[in-house]
Amino acid sequence: MRSRLLALVAVLTLLTTVSASALPGLGSVAGLAPVKCTPDDVTVDGRVFPEPRLSATFLTFADFECGVGVLDELHPGLIEITELAEPSRGGAPVYDIRVTDESVPLADKRHLLIMSSIHGNEHAGREGAARVIEDMVDQRNDQAFIQQTLAQFVVHFVFPNPDGWINGDMTHDDGGVNFTRANDGSRDLNRNFPVQGYLRASNGTLDQPEGRGLDALLAEFADLEHDSDDPDYRGWYLGTDNHGQGVKPVAASGLQIVGQFDYRKSERLARFADSISDNIEGIALDSIEALNQATGGAVQPYEWGTLYDILGYSAAGSGIDYYNSPVTQDGHGVEGTGFATEMTASNLPFSNILTHPGEVNQMWVDTVRAINYAMFKTAVEPLTHTFPVGGRAAYVLDPTPTSSIDSNGFGAGNDTIPGNFTGDDPEVDPDFSFTHYTVSRMRFFTDLNRFADNPLDAVRVPDVLSGATDLSSYDSLVLADEVMPEGTDLAGWVGALRTFVEGGGNLVVTDGAATVLADLLDGIDAGHVGVTNRNVGYVDFLETSEDHLNEGLRGVASQTWDVIPVGYPDNAGAAPNWTVDRTAWDALPGAVTAGTNGTGRTIYGQADLGDGTVTFLGALLPEPTEDYFHPYGLQNYAVTYTGYTLLENMLDHQR
């Protein structure tokens, strides 16, 4: 595979250094327009935006403006060309092209977001979006899901970075040289948003007009009063953020965002991610195979996972993270359900519009089509999602939240405002103040119970010790992050847990509660249990004879929780991952190690105790932290789709 990938890199590099005059594109043939700027113009295939393999160049910003204007003229009642509140740093309009059936009252509709090429050197998003707009309004396109989308939703095609686009347009008056990732303010616009959780001050929160404009658009249509499945909901629903990446042996990588996503939202995104695969097979496979034949490459259609699973990092301040932001205590948020994608080879240094690999661009455009069509199909036919619980289960309640109004206020992370933070700049927010919060990992369980087929009860330590709560009535009990959230009788509490397990119960131990393992399990000493900080919470899965623990894994499965939403810094090795010496663990009765995470130690596994089991996952549900800068508040939890799957497996127990 490595030799094939290197060959693909070499061929793609060659393709990207061949001038347009040497390419077989037909857009430059005499008498043919590269893009229609009037309805009477003639293009090579009759489209306003010709297919890329027939085009001589990438779309210039002026081409896009021409083409969208023609589509608006040809298809009245389907397109509204709007601009965000402020022009770009370089003075260009930031377009929000709204596509909908205007014969259906707008007040009855929800909103879908498609962000394209927020990094200006990542061509695929905008090249694909222009064609998708035309596909949707062209009346020859009578696919039912398109017509349903037009009737039920306003689709916002937002092009956030015209500066980065124009900088590579050689036909621009200023004579561009390279498409640029940043805008003309040298800012990465995809780090410019006021996300809840840890914020990297150096990102320059909302200090760019493009970010402020998108923030205003999202606020305009945010519905913070209704649930997204409520018939009265009129806010942001699904969204995609289409990017480019370096050369990988897949046409597209899907990135599931992580945050305070209840089970329905997490599953909605996961099913959306899965459905993209079928759409790529149906729409983009021919162009992928054509590229492979032309290059001798071995590009596969698709992969998906979290941002960390796919690219190996987390990102504070991204636009799609902000789109997914929940409602804060102060009444802010967006409440969208968004997904990000990366098209292969779409951030290579194509020097300008005169360097145009048509077959590569066709692969991008068809892949973007598949991604956005998958979103439309998911939007018009939403599924219901039920979290299965294998028996009667409970969780140990921690009644003390993490709050901005408790004795330590906003915590150590907000004791001082970093000098490079821009969110309190009068131009950004003249009335800036820290966002208040009262958060707890316990919110995860109350949210989960909305979708569980057998909701989990909340039990309290004092009630168990007093005999008011009988643990023997439960099949499973979850102890998350703290051994004993209330009380002082640790010996009595450990004894109650031991009695529960030995009697046939299943004790699920996560995160910092791992220290109880040394008290419960003979053969595990305190020195066998420890914490190692990583960039995120994750598991490297192993093949085991107890395959029920790893059943149902999807996508690129590894990350179990993310850092930024619950206050930990990104890519800083600050995420606590609790592990147990594997030799000691595997020596326990009935023990199995289902996963490690780079240390050779057990982070996920199960062992017998009496007639019951102890199931351990050392990275799932930590309490949010106030130790790092978090000006816009904190989220309650950040469990990934893989984390949900593992919890489902761990709760599949009956006495």
Image: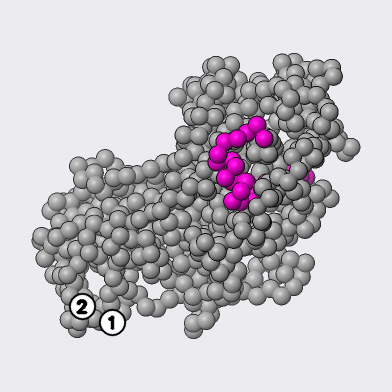
- Residue 41 x %, y %: 83, 27
Q: For label 1, count other residues whose C-alpha is less than 10 Å away and answer few (under 14), some (14-19) or many (20+).
A: few
- Residue 10 x %, y %: 59, 22
In-image side of 445 versus 51 (left or right): left
The picture quadrant where one finds residue 236 is bottom right
- Give the residues in magenta: 139-164
Is 299 above or below relative to 181?
A: above
Label 2: state its secondary structure.
Answer: loop
The residue type indicated by label 2 comes to Thr
Q: Is residue 152 magenta?
A: yes
Q: Residue at x 46, y 67 (%)?
A: 636
- Residue 398 x %, y %: 35, 75
> Gap in Å between the C-alphas at discs 1 and 2?
15 Å
Is 235 above or below relative to 469?
A: above
Q: Is residue 410 visible?
A: yes
In front here: 223 or 412?
Answer: 223
Tell me the residue that label 2 is attached to. Answer: 469
Name, please, the residue furthest toward the front.
Answer: 103
In front here: 518 or 331?
Answer: 331
